[in-house]
Amino acid sequence: MFGQSWGGYAVGAVLNLHPEVKAAVMVSGFNRSIDMMRQPGRKIAGPAVSLILPCLDLYEHVKFGKFAGYTALDGLKKSKAGIFITQSRDDQVVPVRYSYDLFHETFQSNPRFRFREYQDRGHAYVYYSQDSVRYRKQFDQEYKEHMRRLGQKPSNESYNVYSTKHFDKSKGLELDVPLMNQMADFYRQYMD
Protein backbone atom coordinates (compact mmCIF):
# COMPACT_ATOMS: atom_id res chain seq x y z
CA MET A 1 0.00 0.00 0.00
CA PHE A 2 0.99 3.62 -0.52
CA GLY A 3 -0.59 6.76 0.89
CA GLN A 4 0.19 10.44 1.27
CA SER A 5 -1.42 12.76 3.86
CA TRP A 6 -4.99 11.44 4.45
CA GLY A 7 -3.89 8.43 2.42
CA GLY A 8 -0.93 7.94 4.78
CA TYR A 9 -3.30 7.91 7.73
CA ALA A 10 -5.56 5.48 5.84
CA VAL A 11 -2.63 3.14 5.18
CA GLY A 12 -1.87 2.95 8.90
CA ALA A 13 -5.51 2.69 9.97
CA VAL A 14 -6.30 -0.06 7.43
CA LEU A 15 -3.56 -2.19 8.96
CA ASN A 16 -5.87 -2.61 11.96
CA LEU A 17 -8.10 -4.76 9.71
CA HIS A 18 -5.79 -6.29 7.11
CA PRO A 19 -2.95 -8.41 8.52
CA GLU A 20 -2.27 -9.79 5.02
CA VAL A 21 -0.64 -6.52 3.88
CA LYS A 22 3.05 -7.15 3.34
CA ALA A 23 4.45 -3.62 2.86
CA ALA A 24 3.27 -0.03 3.08
CA VAL A 25 4.66 3.45 2.48
CA MET A 26 3.31 6.39 4.50
CA VAL A 27 4.17 9.84 3.18
CA SER A 28 3.25 12.73 5.51
CA GLY A 29 0.60 10.54 7.14
CA PHE A 30 -0.78 11.21 10.59
CA ASN A 31 -1.95 9.08 13.50
CA ARG A 32 -5.60 10.06 14.07
CA SER A 33 -8.04 11.94 11.90
CA ILE A 34 -8.66 14.44 14.69
CA ASP A 35 -4.93 15.32 14.54
CA MET A 36 -5.41 16.44 10.95
CA MET A 37 -8.22 18.76 12.00
CA ARG A 38 -6.30 20.26 14.91
CA GLN A 39 -3.70 22.26 12.91
CA PRO A 40 -6.04 23.93 10.37
CA GLY A 41 -8.56 24.42 13.16
CA ARG A 42 -6.04 26.45 15.14
CA LYS A 43 -5.44 28.67 12.13
CA ILE A 44 -9.18 29.26 11.68
CA ALA A 45 -10.51 29.32 15.24
CA GLY A 46 -7.42 29.86 17.38
CA PRO A 47 -7.61 28.36 20.88
CA ALA A 48 -11.38 27.89 20.46
CA VAL A 49 -10.60 24.84 18.34
CA SER A 50 -10.20 22.96 21.63
CA LEU A 51 -13.94 23.38 22.13
CA ILE A 52 -14.81 22.16 18.63
CA LEU A 53 -12.58 19.07 18.40
CA PRO A 54 -14.56 16.95 20.90
CA CYS A 55 -17.70 17.60 18.83
CA LEU A 56 -15.90 16.49 15.65
CA ASP A 57 -14.60 13.41 17.44
CA LEU A 58 -18.14 12.53 18.56
CA TYR A 59 -19.48 13.12 15.04
CA GLU A 60 -16.88 10.74 13.60
CA HIS A 61 -17.80 8.05 16.14
CA VAL A 62 -21.52 8.42 15.39
CA LYS A 63 -20.96 8.35 11.62
CA PHE A 64 -18.24 5.69 11.39
CA GLY A 65 -18.70 3.65 14.57
CA LYS A 66 -15.75 1.53 15.64
CA PHE A 67 -13.75 2.54 12.56
CA ALA A 68 -13.44 6.09 13.91
CA GLY A 69 -11.35 4.77 16.78
CA TYR A 70 -8.68 3.19 14.58
CA THR A 71 -5.35 4.94 14.66
CA ALA A 72 -2.36 4.52 12.39
CA LEU A 73 -0.19 3.78 15.42
CA ASP A 74 -2.43 0.88 16.47
CA GLY A 75 -2.44 -0.46 12.91
CA LEU A 76 1.34 -0.27 12.69
CA LYS A 77 1.63 -2.13 16.00
CA LYS A 78 -0.77 -4.90 14.93
CA SER A 79 0.76 -5.40 11.50
CA LYS A 80 3.72 -7.54 10.53
CA ALA A 81 4.20 -5.53 7.32
CA GLY A 82 7.31 -3.67 6.37
CA ILE A 83 6.67 0.05 6.81
CA PHE A 84 8.47 2.95 5.10
CA ILE A 85 7.65 6.36 6.64
CA THR A 86 8.80 9.66 5.18
CA GLN A 87 7.95 13.28 5.92
CA SER A 88 9.47 16.74 5.85
CA ARG A 89 10.18 18.49 9.12
CA ASP A 90 8.74 21.78 7.76
CA ASP A 91 5.32 20.23 7.01
CA GLN A 92 2.76 22.92 7.87
CA VAL A 93 -0.28 20.72 7.16
CA VAL A 94 0.59 17.68 9.27
CA PRO A 95 2.94 18.68 12.09
CA VAL A 96 5.60 16.02 12.63
CA ARG A 97 4.66 15.69 16.32
CA TYR A 98 1.35 14.07 15.20
CA SER A 99 3.05 11.81 12.71
CA TYR A 100 6.72 11.22 11.91
CA ASP A 101 8.04 11.92 15.42
CA LEU A 102 5.38 9.73 17.04
CA PHE A 103 6.05 6.82 14.68
CA HIS A 104 9.82 7.21 14.84
CA GLU A 105 9.84 7.30 18.64
CA THR A 106 7.72 4.14 18.77
CA PHE A 107 9.35 2.07 16.01
CA GLN A 108 12.87 3.40 15.41
CA SER A 109 14.50 0.21 16.68
CA ASN A 110 12.07 -2.12 14.87
CA PRO A 111 13.84 -3.63 11.81
CA ARG A 112 10.68 -3.76 9.70
CA PHE A 113 10.47 0.06 9.74
CA ARG A 114 12.42 2.48 7.52
CA PHE A 115 12.37 6.22 8.12
CA ARG A 116 13.35 9.00 5.71
CA GLU A 117 13.18 12.54 7.02
CA TYR A 118 13.51 15.72 4.99
CA GLN A 119 13.87 19.32 6.16
CA ASP A 120 12.51 21.54 3.40
CA ARG A 121 9.94 19.72 1.27
CA GLY A 122 6.79 20.86 3.03
CA HIS A 123 3.70 18.68 2.92
CA ALA A 124 3.07 18.08 -0.75
CA TYR A 125 6.60 17.89 -2.20
CA VAL A 126 8.13 15.04 -0.23
CA TYR A 127 8.61 12.69 -3.17
CA TYR A 128 9.58 15.34 -5.71
CA SER A 129 13.19 16.13 -6.61
CA GLN A 130 15.07 19.02 -5.01
CA ASP A 131 15.08 20.74 -8.41
CA SER A 132 11.30 20.38 -8.52
CA VAL A 133 10.93 21.81 -5.00
CA ARG A 134 13.13 24.80 -5.96
CA TYR A 135 11.19 25.30 -9.19
CA ARG A 136 7.82 25.28 -7.36
CA LYS A 137 9.04 27.77 -4.76
CA GLN A 138 10.35 30.04 -7.52
CA PHE A 139 7.11 29.62 -9.48
CA ASP A 140 5.04 30.56 -6.41
CA GLN A 141 7.16 33.70 -5.91
CA GLU A 142 6.74 34.64 -9.57
CA TYR A 143 2.98 34.20 -9.26
CA LYS A 144 2.84 36.42 -6.16
CA GLU A 145 4.92 39.06 -7.93
CA HIS A 146 2.61 38.84 -10.95
CA MET A 147 -0.44 39.41 -8.73
CA ARG A 148 1.31 42.32 -6.97
CA ARG A 149 2.03 43.98 -10.34
CA LEU A 150 -1.65 43.58 -11.24
CA GLY A 151 -2.66 45.04 -7.88
CA GLN A 152 -4.73 41.94 -7.06
CA LYS A 153 -4.81 39.57 -4.12
CA PRO A 154 -3.70 36.01 -4.82
CA SER A 155 -6.51 33.46 -5.00
CA ASN A 156 -6.88 29.79 -5.89
CA GLU A 157 -8.69 30.72 -9.09
CA SER A 158 -6.02 33.17 -10.29
CA TYR A 159 -3.27 30.71 -9.31
CA ASN A 160 -4.91 27.99 -11.41
CA VAL A 161 -5.22 30.33 -14.41
CA TYR A 162 -1.60 31.46 -14.04
CA SER A 163 -0.41 27.86 -13.62
CA THR A 164 -2.22 26.70 -16.74
CA LYS A 165 -0.28 29.24 -18.78
CA HIS A 166 3.11 29.21 -17.06
CA PHE A 167 3.74 26.04 -15.01
CA ASP A 168 6.31 23.67 -16.56
CA LYS A 169 5.13 20.20 -15.51
CA SER A 170 8.40 18.53 -16.49
CA LYS A 171 10.20 20.75 -13.93
CA GLY A 172 7.48 21.00 -11.29
CA LEU A 173 6.53 17.32 -11.19
CA GLU A 174 9.97 15.73 -11.44
CA LEU A 175 10.12 12.83 -9.00
CA ASP A 176 12.96 12.18 -6.57
CA VAL A 177 14.19 9.11 -8.44
CA PRO A 178 16.55 7.87 -5.69
CA LEU A 179 13.70 8.05 -3.14
CA MET A 180 11.27 6.31 -5.50
CA ASN A 181 13.89 3.60 -6.09
CA GLN A 182 14.30 3.18 -2.31
CA MET A 183 10.54 2.70 -2.02
CA ALA A 184 10.43 0.22 -4.91
CA ASP A 185 13.34 -1.75 -3.42
CA PHE A 186 11.57 -1.70 -0.06
CA TYR A 187 8.42 -3.18 -1.61
CA ARG A 188 10.44 -5.84 -3.41
CA GLN A 189 12.14 -6.81 -0.16
CA TYR A 190 8.78 -7.60 1.45
CA MET A 191 7.14 -9.16 -1.60
CA ASP A 192 9.74 -11.90 -2.06
Image (cartoon, helix red, strand yellow):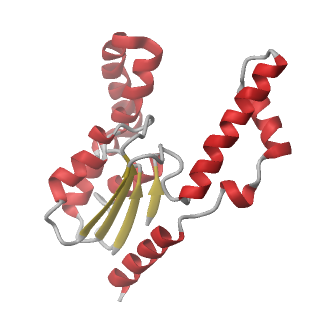
Q: Name the side, left or right, on which 110 lies relative to 10.
A: left
Question: Which residue is found at the position 73% from the left and 61% from the top?
Answer: 170
**For the view shown, which residue lies furthest in the top direction?**
48
Question: Which residue is found at the position 33% from the left and 28% from the top?
Answer: 57
Q: Name the side, left or right, on which 182 lies relative to 128.
A: left
Question: Which residue is found at the position 37% from the left and 76% from the top?
Answer: 186
Question: Residue 151, percent across and down?
Answer: 80, 15
**For the view shown, which residue lies furthest in the bottom direction?**
192
Quadrant for the N terminus, please.
Answer: bottom left
- Name which quarter of the figure residue 160 lies in: top right
- Seen from the viewer's position, the closer of residues 78 and 155 is 155
Question: Which residue is found at the position 22% from the left and 54% from the top?
Answer: 104
- Seen from the viewer's position, the closer of residues 148 and 55 is 148
Q: Image height check: is 44 above or below 86?
A: above
Question: Residue 39, percent across and down?
Answer: 39, 27
Q: Image height check: is 43 above or below 57?
A: above
- Seen from the viewer's position, the closer of residues 171 and 163 is 171
Question: Residue 3, percent across and down?
Answer: 46, 57
Q: Image height check: is 151 above or below 97?
A: above
